[in-house]
Structure formats: structure tokens, C-alpha cells
Amino acid sequence: MIRYDVLVVGAGIIGAACAYRLAERGLKVGVMEQAPAPAMGSTGKSAAGVRVQFTEATNILLSWHSIQEYRAMPEAAYRPIGYLFLVPLSQWEMHLKGVALQQSLGVPVQVRDLEAAQEWFDFMPRAAGLEPIQGATYGPADGTVDPHGICLEYLRRARALGAVLHTETAFLAAEQVGSGWKVETTRGSFQTSFVLNAAGAWAGEIGRRAGLSIPVEPARRMVFCTAPRPHPSRQPLTIDLSSGFWFRPEHDRLIFGRSNPADVGFREGMDWSWLEPTLEVGMARFPWLEQLQLDQKASWWGYYEVTPDHNPILGRLPGVEGWVNACGFSGHGVQQAAMVGRRMAEEIADGEAHSLNINPLRYERFAQTRKVAEKNIV
């Protein structure tokens, strides 16, 4: 029987950040991962964007302070290419309120008119089948990082502080024993005071195997990639909020995508039938996309870990001693991981996260049938 103070389930970027900050507090930490290596799930397949353009203070600050940490971490390979939101009239007022909140929290976000928004590329403000674009917002500190590099660096730091990583170790079952947990795995049993559920798309299943209800389910997402462009230009990660279509540069290529709300569950492989509806709205807004060629071999897929309100579940599970969740990020895990690690260390070592109010993201919101009011969900 291997004993830990905290057993982190999942060696993606969230689990790695939590393991590092918990080990930093002097706790004996174990990290278990069902895959052969860390960062092989959503972390390694992320589109790697980081942004602060949210409408709720907790999400803004989790992302903003995480970006500051990544900026100082060479392994993060942070690139401030910016995020450009093209905003339709129906969302314009709400979006401006979000910008006012972001700016009040010290976040550099700008409002741009249509002409200024076309600084990097042309787009059709009015396109068939899509709501007209009213204006745009731009976050110059938003950009991209290397999630794989961040994850491995956090784990390196955690292991230097005594944490132990167990790969190819699947979570089979768990039961409460006294004030702690006995966890059965494919590599034997662990005993721990705390289980920290950072299992990404598998977080709901991990809960079920422990007899708990954690409302996190997998959703498959496609990332399509173009062939190399003859004259690549610097462009921000751009999101058309009228359709959900997004794209960003990846060296001399573009990657792009659009969430399919019907693609839920553990489905594997590329869904090439989703390419046509994705390009249909993309080319309507950005006609120049038609000139680019697709590279099927460079395209990929991965899982989002979604909750009913598309916001994460953070903190202790009410009524269940020793169980803590850091899961359900719904596509926002990479951009918030650094600060989530710090907050979960407070939650476990100090009894409650205290340097940032995470109450809006706690599990209790589901029992109260209320949702997080976050509007900028892509």
C-alpha cells in the first residue's frame, strides 16, 4: 500500500500544475496517469490558445494571472499574437460590458471598429446566412503557449520536490477509509488523505468509479490544418462569434475549427463530415480561405471536458471528505492551469482557496440549479 497526502488523478496540464504547487507546500504527492506518458490527452491535443476575454471576474483573473506565469516560463513558449473577437450586434452590448470589467481588472483589451479590425486580413461584415458583425475586441496579451512543455515542466518541478508519477496506472475504484481514501488501480492500491480529480474528459467516469456524481462529459473537437502558405502573415487567433468559427496561424499554416454541439461522448478519430459545415461558415466570412489547401495528415482531434454550463468545477466536493475537483474546463484548461494549481494547493493545504474567489465555480452551483453567468464560451 503506497500512501500519499494527495493523489492527483491525471497528468495533464491541470494535474501537473496542482501536483507542483501541492509538493511546494511540503505535501507528499502522487500523480497517476492511465496513458504511457503525461500530456497525451486534451493537453497535448489543445489548440494552445490563452485569453483573458471572459465576462466573469473569476475566469478573467484565472486566465490573466496564468498568462503572467507563462510569460516568465521559457518552457511555455508564450507568443502574444492576440485574440480578435468579431462580435455580432446581438452580443455587442454584453461584450462591451465584458470589456469594461476586463479593463477594470487591469487587463489590456481594446475595442475596435470594423475598419480597424481588418488590419490583419479582410472579412465580410455582412455574409449570407450569418449575423452581421457590429465591431470587434482585441486582447494584445492573448496568444498561444506550448501546453506540452508547460505540463512537463510542472511535473519536473513537482518530482524535484518529491512527487511521484505513476504512468500506465488506471483508476479502477475508490472507497472512503476513515478520513481518507483507498484507491484501487491497475498497478496496485494507494491510500491518500485527498483525491484530486484532474482527469480531464475522464473526470466524470473517475467520479462514477468512486460512487460520486461529477457532471463532466467528453466532447470531441476537430482541429483542421491547411497546407503551408506561400506568404504567411502574422494574424491573431480570430473568432467569429456569429458562427463559432475560429482560426489562427501555426508557423506557415493556419489551423481552424468550429465546435459541433452534437459531437459528445468518447468518439475517436477525425470527423471529416464536419469539415464542410465548418468551411461553409468560415468561407462566408473569410472568402480568402478558399485559396488555401487542406492538409488532412496534419489535422487532428481531441476531447473537451464539458460541464452543463461549460465552466470548470473547482474545490472540495460538498459532503465528501477528502475529494477535490479540478476538472470540467470546457476548453479553458490550458489558459487557467497555472492559477488553478495555486488555488487547489490553498484549498487542500489551507482548507480553502483564499487568494482568489472561486466560489462561482464550485460544485454547489449545480445543486442550486444555477449556472455560471460566463458568456464568452466558444
Image (cartoon, rainbow, N blue to C red):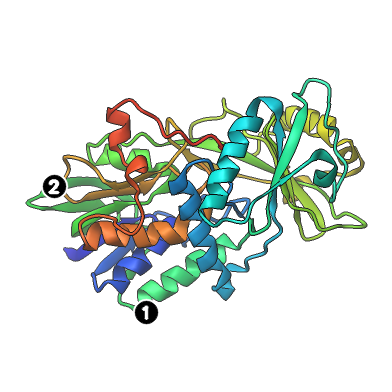
Image quarter of residue 173:
top left
Whole-angstrom CA distance, mark 1 to mark 2, is 30 Å
Q: Residue at x 33, y 77 (%)?
A: 161
Q: Quadrant of the C terminus?
A: top right
- At label 2, the amino acid type is Gln
Residue 266 location (% of width, % of height)? 49, 35
**Residue 293 showing in the rendered view:** yes
Compare marks 1 and 2 and give the one earlier in the sequence.
1
Which residue ends up furthest to the left in the rendered image?
178
Q: Quadrant of the N terminus?
A: bottom left
Residue 233 location (% of width, % of height)? 86, 57
* Image vertical order of residue 168 relative to residue 76, above or below: above
Left or right: residue 10 compared with residue 71: left
Q: Secondary structure at mark 1?
A: helix
Give the camera-side residue of 332 and 131: 131
Give the camera-side residue of 18 and 90: 90
Residue hosting label 2: 176
* Image vertical order of residue 300 relative to residue 212, above or below: below
Q: Which mark is residue 160?
A: 1
- Graded by Cα atoms within 10 Å as few (under 14), some (14 to 19) or many (20 or more), the crowding at tag 2 reads some
